[in-house]
Image (cartoon, grey):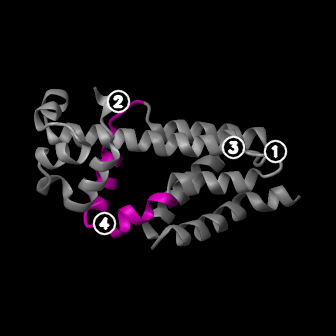
Amino acid sequence: MVSMINYKPVVELLSHYGLHKTTMSDLAEAVGVTRQTLYNRFKTKDHVRDWALLEFMSEVNDTAIAVLDNAPPDAALDAILEAFERWGGDHVSMVCQSPHGADILEGGLQLVASRAETPIDRFENCLEKFIESKQLSPSPAETTMVLVLAAKGVFVTSANAKDYSEKMEAVVKALLGARQAA
């Protein structure tokens, strides 16, 4: 049942109207099912939101991981930058320009904080292995941590995807560029 429901309209609706103003009827209409179907499956709007955010974060992280998995051997820094663009840059406008985008971000962060393993963990593990396999840093775990923390800071301070990309390019080059050039 859940696989038949597209999470994207839920995330878009909630980022525009917020959880409190959005009704189960609004959510049902957005995804093309009856309100009763949503109640039967999710019970509450909070559960619909949680499911949609986890699906959203899983797709975002899977897309970023795919960039690293399919990276050309001679373009490691470009692959890392593109992975971060898929991970964060593609979603800056939703958070910064939607009336309730920041609420969606906060809800997602709270949701993953309560889980043992998160989609973000998968991305971080893949990034660390990528950095290690390409010998981009003598300390891949620490470099990964700094990159992810920097990406989060860049995300909340960026005006749009281009701004995010430019800032992340500076971060990636500062952390890894000198080593790659050597």
Residue type beneath disc 2: Ser
Q: Residue at x 68, y 37 (%)?
A: 129
Instruction: Find out whether residue 93 is within the magenta segment.
Output: yes
In this rendering, does residue 146 appear at all? Answer: no
Mark 3 vs 4: CB contact within 8 A: no
Q: Residue at x 53, y 39 (%)?
A: 62
Rendered view: 132 above or below 97: above
Residue 57: quadrant of the picture: top left
**Which residue has dot 4 on it?**
98
Q: Nearer the viewer, mark 3 or mark 2?
A: 2
Q: What's the magenta bit mostly, secondary-structure-wise?
A: helix
Numbered circle sitting on residue 140: 3
Residue type beneath disc 4: Ser
- Earlier sequence position, callout 4 versus callout 1: 1
Spatial separation of the CA atoms under disc 2 and disc 1 = 35 Å
Q: Nearer the viewer, mark 3 or mark 1?
A: 1
Disc tally is 4
For numbered disc 2, what is the local secondary structure?
A: helix
Rendered view: 29 above or below 155: above
Q: Residue furthest front?
A: 32
Instruction: Find out whether residue 78 is within the magenta segment.
Output: no
- Between 51 and 4, the one nearer to me in the picture: 4
In this rendering, does residue 118 appear at all? Answer: yes
Q: Nearer the viewer, mark 2 or mark 1?
A: 2
**Which residue has dot 2 on it?**
3
Q: Percent position (x, y) of residue 94? A: 37, 62
- Earlier sequence position, callout 4 versus callout 2: 2
**Which residue has dot 1 on it?**
73
**Disc 2 crowd, CA 10 A, few/some/many (<14, 14-19, 20+):** few
Residue type beneath disc 1: Pro
Q: Nearer the viewer, mark 4 or mark 2?
A: 2
Q: Which residues are magenta?
A: 89-116
